[in-house]
Image (cartoon, rainbow, N blue to C red):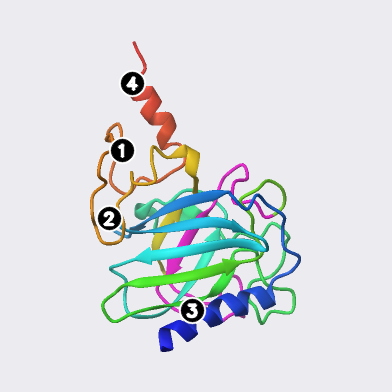
């Protein structure tokens, strides 16, 4: 019951705090695969366009229990060797400040904290009304893409530039559904392998950058 109330509060808090919602194709779907600091895959996110933003369904394991900051960052690169700094700063296309309690906040990428259970699992639905899967301001598919980041600590919703949220402990590049081979090509948080899929062309573990597809094409191109 407590977890249900937390999830409901997450959705309602963000809906109340956001500015004008972007328009979008409600059938649009995107996916993201989380990797940890070791480059190991630990879960997934499914993003779907809603009437007033993007609904993000999280299914992640192997996280420290407790309250954690959860943000959209402005670059679609997740490199564990950089501590996920490759994902850039918070996504803020409208030039606002960080935090729901900031006078000029929040960033489009700001979202309420999420709560990891004692067994390290995180399952939640979060509505972000400041972004869209469509084109235009707030699009998660602008020129350099975007990433979902989970931090080691909680967001205080006020401190600049990122809420004093601590290290970045998990990262996932947001990818359009049509960029993936199939929706089953990535493992779920349960660790179950896909029923059938072709292996990527020697993509290193933890490499979830948007240009992985380009390297795959290079690997199979005739000499």
Residue 203 bears which disc, if any? 1
Work out which quarter of the rendered image holds the C terminus and state it. Answer: top left
Q: Which mark is residue 7?
A: 3
Q: CA distance from mark 3 to mark 2?
A: 26 Å
Q: Secondary structure at mark 2?
A: loop
Distance from the alpha carbon under mark 1 to that under mark 3: 35 Å
Is residue 165 part of the magenta span, yes or no?
Answer: yes
| Residue 158 numbered tag | none
Measuring from the top left, give residue 99's x and y in whole percent: 63, 76
In this rendering, is residue 60 above or below 80? below
Q: Earlier in the sequence, mark 2 or mark 1?
A: 2
- Comes first in the chain, label 3 or label 2: 3
Circle nearer the viewer, 1 or 3: 3
Q: Residues within 10 Å of mark 4 (few under 14, many from 20)?
A: few
Distance in Å between CA atoms under marks 4 and 2:
25 Å
Q: Nearer the viewer, residue 187 or 75?
A: 187
Q: Is residue 32 magenta?
A: no
Q: Earlier in the sequence, mark 1 or mark 3?
A: 3
- The 10 Å Cα crowd at callout 2, few under 14, some 14 to 19, many 20 or more, is some
- Provide the secondary structure element on which disc 3 rests: helix
Q: Residues within 10 Å of mark 3 (few under 14, many from 20)?
A: some
* Front: mark 3 or 4: 3
Q: Are marks 2 and 1 in contact (CB under 8 Å)?
A: no
Residue located 30% across and 31% down the image: 201
- How crowded is the residue under tag 1: few (<14 C-alpha within 10 Å), some, or many (20+)? few
- Quadrant of the rendered structure where residue 143 is? top right
**Residue at label 2?**
40
Residue 220 has which mark? 4
Nearest to N terminus: mark 4 or mark 2: 2
Disc 1 element? loop
* Mark 4 touches mark 2? (CB < 8 Å): no
């Amino acid at each position: 019951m407590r977890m249900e109330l937390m999830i409901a509060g997450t959705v309602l808090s963000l809906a109340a705090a956001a500015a004008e919602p972007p328009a979008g194709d409600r059938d649009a779907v995107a996916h993201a695969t989380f990797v940890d600091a070791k480059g190991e895959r630990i879960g997934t996110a499914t993003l779907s366009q809603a009437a007033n933003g993007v609904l993000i369904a999280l299914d992640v394991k192997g996280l420290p229990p407790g309250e954690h900051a959860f943000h959209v960052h402005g670059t679609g690169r997740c490199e564990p060797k950089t501590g996920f700094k490759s994902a850039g700063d918070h996504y803020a296309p409208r030039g606002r400040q960080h935090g729901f309690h900031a006078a000029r906040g929040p960033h489009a990428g700001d979202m309420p904290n999420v709560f990891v259970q004692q067994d390290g699992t995180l399952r939640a639905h979060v509505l972000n009304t400041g972004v869209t899967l469509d084109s235009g301001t707030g699009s998660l598919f602008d020129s350099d893409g975007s990433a979902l980041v989970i931090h080691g600590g909680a967001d205080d919703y006020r401190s600049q530039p990122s809420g004093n949220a601590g290290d970045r402990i998990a990262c996932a590049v947001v990818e359009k559904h049509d960029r993936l081979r199939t929706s089953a090509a990535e493992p779920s948080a349960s660790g179950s392998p896909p029923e059938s899929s072709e292996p990527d062309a020697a993509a290193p573990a933890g490499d979830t950058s948007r240009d992985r597809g380009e390297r795959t094409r290079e690997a199979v191109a005739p000499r």
